[in-house]
Amino acid sequence: MTAGRTLRSLAVGLAACALALAGPSLVAAYWPVGPDAVVDLTPTVSAKHYQYWPGGGRHHQPIIVPYHQIGPDGPWASDLLLVDENTANQIDCPPHMMPKQDSGLPNAGYWGFLTCDKVPVWQWVGEVVKIDARSILDQAPNGQSPIITKQMVQAAEQAYRPLRPGDAALYWSGYDDKYDKPMPEGWKLLIGPISGTSPAWPDPDFDAADYVGSKGVRLMGTDAPSMGAFGPPRYVNHGPDSSFQNPLALESHLGHFKYGAVHTEGLMNLHLVPNASLYISLPPKHRDSPTVESRSVAITDLKLAAELLKATRAHRVVDLSVILSMDHPVWWPGAGVGNYVFPYHAVIPVNTYTQWTGPYWVNTHIMDAHSGTHMDPPAHFGPPTGFNFATYNDWTKGVQRKYEAKYGRIKTTDMTSDKVPAHYCIGPARVVDVTHRVGTTDPKSWPASPAIRVEDVQAHEKLYGPIKAGEVVIFHSGHTDAHFREYQRGVEDPNTAAPLNGHAEGWPAPTPETINYVIDKGVKCIATDGPSMGSVNPEEAVMTHWAAASREVPFVEFLTNAGSLPASGGFFIFLAPKYENNHGGPGRAIGILP
């Protein structure tokens, strides 16, 4: 035994003693959530709906291309996503309509630098305070918005309590629930208001938004397609200033942005969310994006919400996501040459403040569905219902025979990422330290990954108690922390490419036995800080994915900073935008500390 391993064993022993002496108070600050305690507030992005911005000619319908399919292509499926940031459920950050302070452009302000990747991670979470605007729904002329006024906000405060820092102020009218329908009925969601043939959605004017921001609120949301109200501006400029007249929609946004606040647009199901719930809206971590596609949920177990809010109000929230950037290794490079999936691309900008469709900034993203920190839903490797296994290619059939001889038949599944229940990837975090596996393979065996075995999980359980149903198991090896960096000319990416090519050891990866052991505990989500849950050995990787897919358990891959969570006692949340029939899910992972 090496000196390093001796020290690690001693540390584990000391930790066990400390835990025994301290009692259970060190563990289990939070508890699992079930399907009745998490409300999904996000509409499914679908080509059957008209959920994208129709004005200006620079926005586009989201496109989901199933470009790699299970069968002759191999054992896995993936999609190419072309995503306009302003689609369905999405987050606006200040630079969406606020240029940088030193730009000299109209509406420039201090928070003009705060793109969504730079927003503090605690700001994506808040205590629900609903501002009821249902009574004014549709109560406006065609093409105009009924206005949520400052007085309506104050009425909500009188009915519940005053707004305060750490809140999530949610403007609730029921608009998206009523109008986000398949076409042709869905024309009233966006086309009708913009064409002036139906009333627009209720939204705050500048004074209402400014009032909410003045109370210290930094997270807002609306169940309308935009936070911008339609109609004549409330603040009309005269003289030379009239050349820069802000439309009413811009006034609504700026009332929040002047405080560095962010807001979510396109919510649904707010009628199912009581005040004091925990609201979470998470965007993928695109670099330098002013507005980003997102996923929003609410935890409605008010006792658990209160415990989590204690931590989030104290900013005890950590980011577990890698940056999405064309300069970082966030897409699968494959082994050898020419085996990569579609690279990550960002179209920056699609529109900006000084273009004829301005004044606002928005980007578009083109990416494989497994880019960066992402979900592998069961349907990524799980064959669909009715699948003809004879269509597998010869290599996959060979792996199938070995797998089924040892673990039983591969089961089919239709659980794409939009069908994974929202509560699956939310729960108390059990961080299984597997750093002792790093450096244990023989270079002569590369490409190879150290195996994460059942005994590694059992060693964790001896220290911190048995893993329970509804917890999220995270394998922490430190791989991404150590190797994720910008590309360098002439240097092989050490995070993913070098291990796949056998020029470095692979990231630690669990065996199918380990996956089955964890799932037998009632776990519905397993995560890793490696680029994949699967080994760099293709055969081993397929078997690991089949083990989870056959039991309809998703993986969350490509975490970073997992060691910032305690081994037990923290809380894990992963959310991915809700694209119809998507076989992956670029998203955002955060951890809430005890």
Image: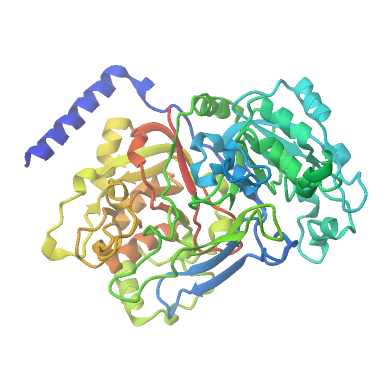
In front of the other: 141 or 99:
99
Extreme right residue here?
A: 141
Q: Position of residue 362 (x, y in %)?
A: 61, 55
Hey, which residue is sitting farthest front in the picture? 240
Which quadrant of the structure image shows residue 8?
A: top left
Quick one: quadrant of the C terminus? top left
Instruction: State whether residue 179 is above or below residue 127.
Output: below
Who is closer to the viewer here, 42 or 416? 42
Q: How many marks?
A: 0
Res. 100 visible in picture: yes
Residue depicted at 68% across the width and 26% down the height: 214
Could you say which is closer to the camera, residue 542 or residue 351? 351
Give residue 432's position: percent from left, percent from top.
31, 41
When asked about the image quadrant of residue 4, the answer is top left
Please give the name of the residue rendered at 41% of the width and 67% of the height, measured from the top-left corner.
Answer: 410
Q: Please give left or right for residue 447 compared with residue 384 in the image.
A: left
Residue at 34% in and 82% down: 394
Q: Residue 415 at x, y = what percent?
A: 54, 60
